[in-house]
Image: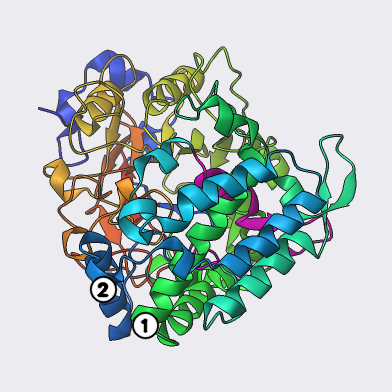
Amino acid sequence: ELQPPSRSQPSDRLSTSRSLLYMGGLLSRRGASVRLASWNVAAVNNNPFEYYTTLADPRYEQLMVAVGELIDAPGERDVPVRSVFTQPMFEKLKASMAAQGWAGIDAVEEVWESDLASRPIVSGFLKDKEIGAKRLASMPDRFTNTINTEDGRTVCRPTVINNYDVPMPDGDAWFAQWHAFFFEAPLLVKAKSGAAAPRLPCAMLSPIKRSKYPALSEAEEAISLPLQLLCLAIFDAILVGLLNQLSPGAWHELKMSICEALVVSKAQRTIDVLQRPEYADVDLLFLQEVSGALVTALRAAPALAERFEVLEPRDCDAVRDQNSLILVAKRLLAGPAGEALSEVELGAEALSGAPVAEGDLCVFRARLELGGEGGATELLLASFHGDTNGLASTPVVSALRQQAAGLPLLVGIDANTYLTRDPKGGKKFVGDFVAECASGEAPLAHSWQGPPEGWQTTYNARTYLQPQLNKAVRYAERATSSLADNNPKDFLLYSEGAFEGAGACARDNTGQGSYVEGTSIPTLTFPSDHCIVSTTLRLR
């Protein structure tokens, strides 16, 4: 009852008036087919350890299990903070912060001496919910984890939780690199005025406002610049110390293997998947969360550039660097690309105020030769990346249906829908989404068959190696925890009156056209945290 009409359902349920909506030449080409695929290729994650992945190296599982066990029951390893972030480290940090002219250095020293230095590293610091609520480690991490400079470089803070590639075999080696990053090497970055200027990473921090984070006291707000940098230093020192204790040497090798696959070579690995024989017959490819580097790679890959027109929205977001694309097989174009393809922009009014970020929606009108008799078919094509909670998905699909105005509609969408209903309505329930797509005039069907439990396209969970421990999941519970993301998020939607299914809807989490149950993605060979979904449709 939760599913809209799927491609397995017969066409004789369509009313005569609904069928007439699509009679502009389509019925004379009954039986012509088109193959579709949709893939959220996933933006680059700055923290290679944030989510569990699947590695053949047994040391990875051993490390993830060991970290979880230590966080759960640290025992005698729950040593005071001063044993990993030492007094000499604090003194050097204090002097450097004072040299920046920051207020509150003496007050921060008092907090260090009377409180932070003696806290147990796990139970008293990593697990302290107040530190999280006050954003004393996560806020400075957001600003300094990974910095893209105006001269084209990507600079990482020396820490476990990003793609920093220099070994940190002990606390002293880590701190020397960390201190130099913050206080010794200005980076060319864009100022608020828009002009590029050299700035030290320590100057990129912002005060934390009590009005936004009320857990912060007035006294803490007054010293929030030096206090947050001290807390970040402690956080980074603890993680480096724990990993060097649990997996000396090996953890850095594991990190570098993940970085190589999912950051350095991510664009090429994505291209490699799309060029495999399993996708050689795809006519329309809908992509989401595409970086500028991947757009360049798509257009530079000979096999793909020869096959496809690469369509991107006019409002591409170069800062967030996550955009939706549509790739259309050139052989289907009914004339030159400039005539057969035209972008359609949906304004804020059409989207009814839905939270749609720039670049997330790509819409084109297309005239395609889909085969059979009767000439070209005119369609509306759309690729969309929904907000985290999926609340924009139905409004955007509704706006697309209205924009189509009688044209057949094909949509590849990461709808960010969820398998379990949120009683507060804060997340989009998959049953509601598919029912809403199927209701009203010009309904949309989806390509899935069976119950939603078989539609899951994500399989990931946060590790303990990230700042939000309240969202972490034990390695053994990454499939079952309520905090894990194992949900039916990705869909191929199509106009029910124009198309019917001509084959099974397939999931791929290997990059080889197959789906392996229980695989945490991404992997070293599959560079996304979303499956590829694909199907074949036939004109009614």
Query: Which of the numbered marks, if any, corresponds to residue 508?
Result: none
| Residue named by callout 1 | 247
| Residue named by callout 2 | 66
Horizontal side of residue 453 vs 437, given as left or right:
left
Where is the C terminus found, in terms of image quarters?
A: top left
Occupied quadrant, residue 420: top left
Occupied quadrant, residue 248: bottom left
Q: Secondary structure at mark 2?
A: helix
Across and down, in percent, residue 311 comes to 62, 46
Q: Amino acid at mark 1?
A: Ser
Where is the N terminus found, in terms of image quarters?
A: top left
Horizontal side of residue 279 vs 358, given as left or right:
left
The magenta segment is 135-162
Q: Is residue 325 above or below residue 50?
A: above
Between 446 and 366, which is closer to the camera in this rendering?
446
- Inspect the magenta stretch and tell me whether residue 151 lies in it: yes
Between 95 and 242, which is closer to the camera in this rendering?
95
* Any part of residue 296 in sight: no
Badge 2, how many Cα within 10 Å: few under 14, some, many 20+? some
Q: Amino acid at mark 2?
A: Ala
Answer whether labels 1 and 2 touch (C-beta < 8 Å): yes
Q: Going 81% across and 35% down the picture, which residue do you hit?
A: 192
Label 1 and label 2: CA atoms lie apart by 9 Å
Instruction: Report the colour scheme.
Output: rainbow
Horizontal side of residue 65 vs 21, given as left or right:
left
Across and down, in percent, residue 485 comes to 28, 48
- Inspect the magenta stretch and tell me whether residue 311 lies in it: no
